Image (spheres, rainbow, N blue to C red):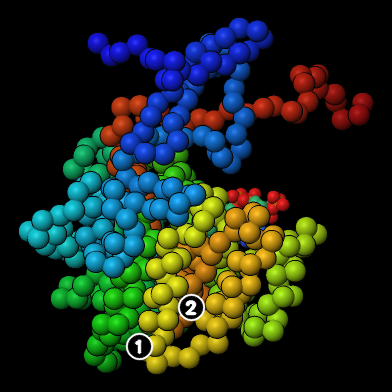
Amino acid sequence: MADAPSLADKATLIIDGRGHDYTVRTGTVGPRVVDIRKLYADTDVFTYDPGFTSTASCQSKITYIDGDQGILLHRGYPIDQLAEKSSFMEVSYLLLHGELPSSAELDTFSNTITRHTMLHEQLATFYRGFRRDAHPMAVMCGVVGALSAFYHDSTDITDPEQRMIASHRLIAKMPTIAAMAYKYTLGQPFMYPDNSLSYTGNFLRMTFGVPAERYEVDPVIESAMDKIFILHADHEQNASTSTVRLAGSSGANPFACIAAGIACLWGPAHGGANEAALNMLREIGRPERIPEYIARAKDKNDPFRLMGFGHRVYKNFDPRAKVLSKAATEVLDKLGIVDPVLDTARELEQIALKDDYFVEKKLYPNVDFYSGVILSAIGFPTSMFTALFALARTVGWVAQWNEMISDPDQKIGRPRQLYVGAAQRDYVPVNQR
Ligand code: CMC
């Protein structure tokens, strides 16, 4: 029998003079949570928390963030160690299965993913329905949602094997889908995957190769790209992951759920910030103009924000930004690229970090601040940045979706509200209004 909760495990809420006790649960690390699932039944009262700033929407074993310390762990492993020593395939296995793979497990996993990289040929026709100037994220939302119309044998969410096949398909096909979205905007032929290449090398070839020429994968670019994928692989219960979980909580198929996640990621406050950050750095153009933009970011009457700065959870350096800041210099040096945008970014960071406004509000560079500089050096247009984020985050989304489906506490997500509209009133015919 479980021990009775001690005082420290209990929270008492007094409503209308009556106390109601709730269990306080403790995780491995991080803030404790008050389990208020019975609150409404007990008291007829809801909690109000728009933006979920004080709400744990689920329990999870996948990713942990300590925003004050600037720590990000995947299955317990620090992100900087994974970025330095691991590969995106290995991190994908880790996120999905909970442990680092043995060498044989990694080979089998990589092989399985490689065997799923091709798309149903009919999907190429689907692309042709889009305008050539469509944003890659618009194409990705549509094509990923459409996968459920093509892969009927992996949409039964009650079957763990079908769930795993759908997960493998999504991780494997996302590079093909993103590369095809890019090729389509250029009017170039789609490139079929080449199974002799790594996950990341294959994506680079499908994006930058053409059928008329042999494409040599540059190891510097391959390694930088793989690191970027690792850094974006998962991030706890962020907006798009919560969207995937909420969509999945109704029993929707995994392709539809991931399409919903892509739609959410697109917003400029979330994944769309990497595109916005580089556009902003280019607009600033030279260090002399930085004070003007800092002043705008601080002006309450100006909607402008420093893109790539600030985070809901990190109130210290985003550990991913630290890795990317170093990688930006390394990649540009190795590729022999001199980009004044990197100088502008470094200067802007220094000025902002000393400015009272940013210090007081604890606004630090986030993952999107330096990623764009690297992606641009590799040759991607800004419109592809968020599509790359979606590609990498797919593994996090499917890991979280699988975890949610297997969780015995899982229920359809159904928030309530504080209703402030009109009270009940009688309909008035139009000629009497
Ligand atoms: N520039 C200027 N002021 C800012 C910024 C910024 N980038 N970010 C936050 N603030 C201010 C904001 O005006 C507010 O001030 P006040 O308290 O006086 O009203 C205060 O800081 C708190 O901001 P908030 O919007 O209430 O905080 P939030 O936790 O709801 O928002 C955020 C977090 C990431 C949406 C926000 O910092 C932001 O819009 N940043 C720029 C966009 C960005 O870089 N997004 C990428 C996030 S990391 C990758 C990802 O999640 O996809």
- The x and y percentages for residue 246 are 45, 39
Q: Amino acid at mark 1?
A: Lys
Per the image, the residue denoted by label 2 is: 373
Q: Is residue 396 above or below residue 347?
A: above
Q: Relative to residue 127, is residue 156 drawn left or right?
A: left
- The x and y percentages for residue 71 are 40, 53
Q: Is residue 366 above or below residue 62?
A: below
Residue 248 seen anywhere in this rendered image of the structure: yes
Along the polypeptide, which appears first: circle 2 or circle 1?
A: 1
In the image shown, does 365 or 190 lie closer to the viewer? 365
* Displayed quadrant of residue 431: top right
**Label 2's element?**
helix
Q: Relative to residue 254, is residue 10 drawn left or right?
A: right
- The x and y percentages for residue 251 are 37, 36
Q: Quadrant of ligand 1?
A: bottom right
Q: Is residue 15 above or below residue 163?
A: above
Per the image, the residue denoted by label 1 is: 334
Name the residue: 41% across, 85% down. 332
Q: Is residue 255 above or below residue 251?
A: below
Residue 241 seen anywhere in this rendered image of the structure: no
Name the residue: 28% across, 61% down. 82
Is the N terminus in the top left, top right, bottom left or bottom right quadrant? top left
Give the mark toward the camera: 2 or 1: 1
Name the residue: 63% across, 72% down. 351
